[in-house]
Image (spheres, rainbow, N blue to C red):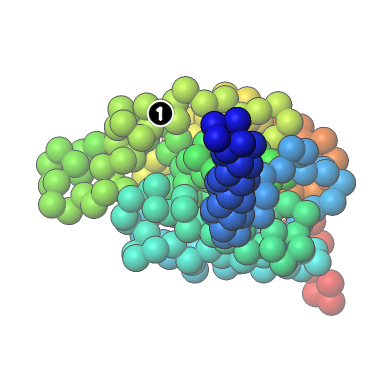
Amino acid sequence: MRSALAPRRRLLVVAVALLVVALAATVALRACAGRPAAREDFPDQSRPGPVLLIPGYGGGQAALSVLAQRIRATGRAATIVALPGDGTGDLNAQAATLDGAVTRALRDGAPSVDLVGYSAGGVVALLWLARHDGVHTARRIVTLGAPLHGTRLAATGAAVVPDACPTACQQLAPGSALLAELDRLTVPARLPWLSVWTDDDQTVVPPDSARLPGAVNVPVQSVCPEVHLAHGDLPADPLVGDLVLGALGTAPLTAPDASDCARSRTSRLSSSRPGS
């Protein structure tokens, strides 16, 4: 009897094992259905995709509208990401919202995305890169006046008027747990990243909080020493716009210099002449 039943038992064990494997595969497929499969390659620098612009603290989109229009004028698609709530909530949630926008772009056939993060939007871009395997989907990233290591203004707000310093404000204070995590990051060599800031910044203090290891780091005054820009001037400034457009191209990303300043000045003069 025992020897007669053994093959049946073995058959039963095999059937159960196959069922378990099938169920596991079904669960895995359902889990992956919400996002394209993880990529093993890296974005082709010669094939630019759409540009996603990430607003700063407060989530206002108006500051990025001029830059978005300039990008669209080159034939690229440019979308300003709508951040959850009023853009002052948890930066982790904002990074998740950005990831949703990236996922939609990829599903629509984009080969990759380029990101432009203004102010706290630059922190969101870095957080997205760290938390959502962005190195496989971001072709290039540009940040403008980003408090990547925090700003004293947030620290003052958290200490003096904590009730008026929402979650994002607290996270942007130097030494916060979130920034301590990001401080350990270095931009991968395969991901061109331009970080631009102005030495005149009174919102992100110190201004070089925007400096990021592995990125091309550029204070505006290193390109045009005579230029004076406040934090809020960065997204719409013509020179900064030229730097952004250059960084989002297909040529290797290099640090701009005085020649870029002269070229931008000449372009502005030409466009301001009657009949031009």
Q: In this rendering, is residue 193 above or below 61?
A: above
The quadrant of the rendering that contains the N terminus is top right
Residue 42 image point, x, y percent: 76, 39
Q: With 220 as the anchor, is 73 left or right in this view? A: right
Q: Is residue 215 above or below residue 62?
A: above
Asked whether residue 170 is in view, the answer is yes
Give x and y (percent) for residue 111.
Answer: 78, 54
Q: Is residue 237 left or right of residue 177?
A: right
What residue appears at the point 63 percent right and 64 percent down from the top-left corner? 104
State the residue at coordinates (39%, 47%). 92
Which residue is most to the bottom? 275
x, y percentage for residue 208? Answer: 47, 30
Does any portion of residue 227 appear in the rendered image? no
Which image quadrant for residue 251?
top right
- Seen from the viewer's position, the closer of residues 93 and 157 is 93
Looking at this view, is 118 or 11 the one in front?
Answer: 11
194 on left or right of 171: right
Of the 4 image quadrants, the one containing the C terminus is bottom right
Residue at point 70% right, 26% down? 189
Name the residue tied to disc 1.
181
**Left/right of residue 252 with respect to residue 96 in the rendered view:** right
Image height of 241 relative to 82, above or below: above
Question: Eyeballing the image, is 215 above or below 140?
Answer: above
The furthest residue to the front: 1
Q: Residues within 10 Å of mark 1 (few under 14, many from 20)?
A: few
Q: Amino acid at mark 1?
A: Glu
Residue 87 position within the rendered picture, expressed as x and y whole percent measured from the top left: 37, 59
Q: Nearer the viewer, residue 260 or 19?
A: 19
Q: Secondary structure at mark 1?
A: helix
Give the quadrant of residue 14: top right
